[in-house]
Image (cartoon, rainbow, N blue to C red):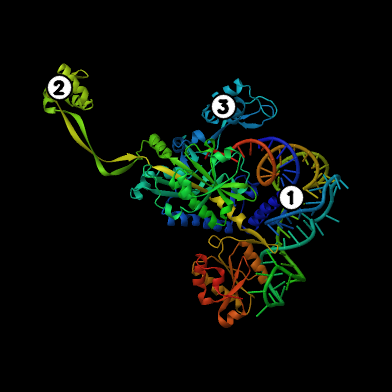
RNA sequence: GCGGUCUUAGUCCAGCUUGGUUAGGACACCAGGUUCCCAACCUGACGACCCGGGUUCAAAUCCCGGAGACCGCACCA
């Protein structure tokens, strides 16, 4: 019974999404293709509004820099990042029944090989281990074909001739890391700073079945926040330290429990539940974002990833989950502490120096004993070789030379005999003004399509057998509906004027004069339009209109001239519906 | 990838067992009428058998293959 109601809501949301143009499966005329969706007019606006909300929070409020890079990425990038090695699954297929299995999972189960070890094994090693342990198909007992890797990145060729491999990026993060040097320069070479990229990513999922939750092409919002690991303090923590985070700890999960603990950001850090201040800060901001798109906090939680669940780059990871009617607890954002993994990898692979220079508060002065070759003396003796000899000498530990002089009266640098008069051993002051290091990264990463689906599901409600999409006003795809009570007697022209005026004010306004007023309200409710303004016969007399609240269906009356200001205040969340006019 | 169920207008469904003239309904949408605040009513218009092949005089209907959806399994770095 519960099952059918779950199906019912999901089906109803999908039906309304198709009918009203929120989203649908792509390529329907060719039979469809799994894992790809098209957003219609309402959906596109809703998705943009959600993404803009995210921008509002992170770009405007926190000061994160936004950038945009390409989807197609040269192979080298994902080789360096570790994706080519890690973004694939070794799979075996049963010869008899054709069933496929994760080879590493079979080894864990039947050969007691740990997942960490199994992950590092080559295909040959896997084959050997399978044969050695006599592992057969768990279903029918058949033998396996040789193991094969299934790469979950889309592969392509860049340019028409060369065999230059390119990948469709499976995340937007690498687009940020590879441009780090320029971004850092733009950020005026100051840490900490963050960069966000919102864009498409591609993952060739084996079986993308869960609608908007798992797509082959989707929109990802990756935020990479760079900071000095020696200065891990978050200067914005004050704003969020009392925000409560519901966390399901890894240790709790190991006990097969789903009990969450509720801790403030402050506590979570104090008790070292979350190890990075910045990570805790972003988790709190992520929670706020979800509240703003309509998910109450009791329907959210953060779940700590277990060591073998973490991505290859991550040190400590949490997933932000939202309770969905259909899919249960569902990930909407991931919070990973990527350390210096990515920048180090790209540094090593590309040869580019991605270190950051940090000036010490007070320069460090050290005295160092050095061997100074006296070229005036060396020249006459070694002639053309003297430059080489000089270089050789200066690399040697002064102590060794000193000891050699004391013992033998000379020092042999290779085949060259160095006498005390050739060099000067002296102490030198060295002033270090700073040092170079690789910044650490904390990454919150949101799935835009998932946020979208979450917003739809939480907005969906039924009132008097009608569907009302209760989007929070700040993300509603259409903000205002304008209706003439009758499409005659000049009410229509008056209403059209009003629509134009509000549109010029920057609102998304829809005009509708077809059908009875009740039908138009119903249509508007389904599209989730928060406010409906109706021009009636009183309007012609006194220049006032009624404003209808989507959620309560109550109405207030206000003068037309006040509308622009009232609407601005309402959509900025500064006033409530009741403050829009006199209740009628 | 596997197994089960399924695929008919914008949406939701009927028809298929037993092949046969013009594939039926509801809602939505559009036009006109009517209507002074919550999917009212009247008239009219538009609009579909998932794709490919086969069987047959004749296929939405039977058979084979494919694609897609849903449920379960597996997968989800």
The mark lying in front, picked from 2 and 3, is 3
Q: Disc 2 is attached to a residue of which chain?
A: A
**CA distance for labels 1 and 2:** 97 Å
Q: Residue A524 at what x, y percent from top left?
A: 62, 65
Name the residue tied to disc 2.
A382
How crowded is the residue under tag 3: few (<14 C-alpha within 10 Å), some, or many (20+)?
Answer: some
Kindly state the secondary structure of the residue where label 1 is placed: loop
| A523 and A237: which is toward the camera | A237
Name the residue tied to disc 3.
A113
Number of numbered discs visible in the structure rendering: 3
Q: Residue A256 at what x, y percent from top left?
A: 61, 39
Please tell me whether residue A209 is drawn above or below residue A471 in the rendered image: above
Residue B53 lies in what quarter of the image?
Answer: top right
Q: Are marks 1 and 2 on the same chain?
A: yes
Kindly state the secondary structure of the residue where label 3 is placed: loop
Q: Earlier in the sequence, mark 1 or mark 2?
A: 1
Image quadrant where one finds the C terminus of chain A: bottom right
Any part of residue A169 in sight: no
Name the residue tied to disc 1.
A1
Q: Are marks 1 and 2 in contact (CB under 8 Å)?
A: no
What residue sits 58% from the left and 65% below the top?
Answer: A530
| A257 and A548: which is toward the camera | A257
Q: Residue A465 at what x, y percent from top left?
A: 70, 62
Residue A432 lies in what quarter of the image?
Answer: top left
Please tell me whether residue A94 is drawn above or below residue A433 in the rendered image: above
């Amino acid at each position: 019974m519960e099952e059918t109601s779950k199906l019912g809501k999901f089906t109803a949301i999908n039906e309304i999404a198709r009918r009203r143009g929120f989203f649908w499966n792509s390529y329907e005329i060719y039979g469809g293709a799994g894992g790809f969706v098209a957003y219609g007019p309402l959906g596109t606006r809703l998705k943009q509004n959600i993404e803009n909300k995210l921008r509002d929070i992170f770009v405007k409020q926190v000061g994160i820099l936004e950038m945009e890079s390409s989807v197609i990425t040269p192979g080298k990038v994902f080789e360096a990042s570790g994706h080519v090695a890690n973004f694939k699954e070794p799979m075996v297929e049963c010869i008899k029944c054709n069933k496929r299995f994760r080879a590493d999972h079979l080894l864990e189960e039947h050969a007691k090989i740990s997942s960490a070890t199994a992950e590092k094994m080559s295909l040959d090693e896997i084959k050997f281990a399978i044969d050695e342990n006599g592992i057969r198909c768990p279903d029918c007992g058949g033998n396996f074909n040789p193991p094969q890797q299934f790469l979950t990145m889309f592969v392509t060729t860049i340019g028409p001739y060369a065999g230059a491999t390119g990948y469709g990026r499976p995340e937007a993060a690498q687009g940020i890391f590879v441009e780090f040097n320029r971004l850092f320069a733009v950020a005026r070479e100051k840490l900490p700073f963050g960069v966000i990229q919102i864009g498409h990513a591609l993952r060739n999922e084996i079986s993308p079945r869960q609608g908007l939750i798992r797509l082959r092409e989707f929109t990802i919002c990756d935020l990479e926040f760079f900071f000095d690991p020696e200065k891990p303090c978050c200067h914005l923590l004050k704003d969020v330290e009392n925000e409560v985070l519901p966390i399901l700890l890894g240790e709790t999960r190991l006990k097969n429990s789903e009990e969450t603990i509720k801790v403030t950001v402050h506590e979570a850090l104090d008790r070292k539940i979350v190890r990075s201040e910045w990570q805790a800060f972003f988790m709190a901001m992520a929670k706020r974002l979800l509240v703003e798109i309509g998910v109450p906090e009791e329907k959210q939680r953060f779940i700590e990833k277990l060591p073998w669940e973490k991505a290859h780059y991550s040190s400590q990871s949490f997933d932000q989950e939202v309770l969905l009617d259909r899919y249960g607890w569902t990930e909407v954002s991931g919070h990973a502490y990527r350390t210096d993994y990515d920048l180090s990898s790209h540094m090593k692979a590309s040869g580019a120096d991605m270190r950051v220079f940090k000036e010490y508060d007070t320069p460090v002065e050290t005295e160092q004993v050095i061997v100074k070759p006296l070229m005036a003396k060396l020249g006459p003796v070694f002639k053309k070789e003297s430059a080489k000899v000089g270089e050789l000498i200066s690399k040697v530990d002064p102590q060794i030379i000193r000891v050699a002089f004391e013992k033998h009266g000379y020092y042999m640098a290779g085949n060259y005999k160095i006498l005390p008069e050739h060099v000067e051993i002296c102490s030198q002051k060295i002033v270090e003004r700073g040092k170079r290091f690789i910044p650490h990264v904390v990454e919150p990463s949101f799935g835009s399509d998932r946020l979208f689906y979450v917003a739809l599901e939480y907005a969906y409600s039924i009132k008097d057998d009608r569907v009302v999409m209760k989007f929070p006003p700040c993300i509603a795809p259409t903000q205002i509906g304008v209706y003439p009570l009758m499409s005659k007697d000049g009410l229509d022209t008056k209403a059209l004027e009003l629509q134009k005026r509000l549109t010029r004010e920057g609102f998304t306004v829809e005009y509708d004069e077809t059908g009875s007023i009740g039908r138009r309200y119903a249509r508007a409710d389904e599209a989730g339009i928060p406010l409906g303004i109706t021009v009636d016969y009183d309007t012609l007399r006194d220049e006032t209109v009624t404003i209808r609240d989507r959620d309560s269906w109550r109405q207030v009356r206000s003068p037309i001239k006040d509308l622009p200001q009232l609407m601005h205040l309402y959509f900025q969340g500064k006033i409530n519906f009741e403050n829009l006019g006199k209740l009628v």
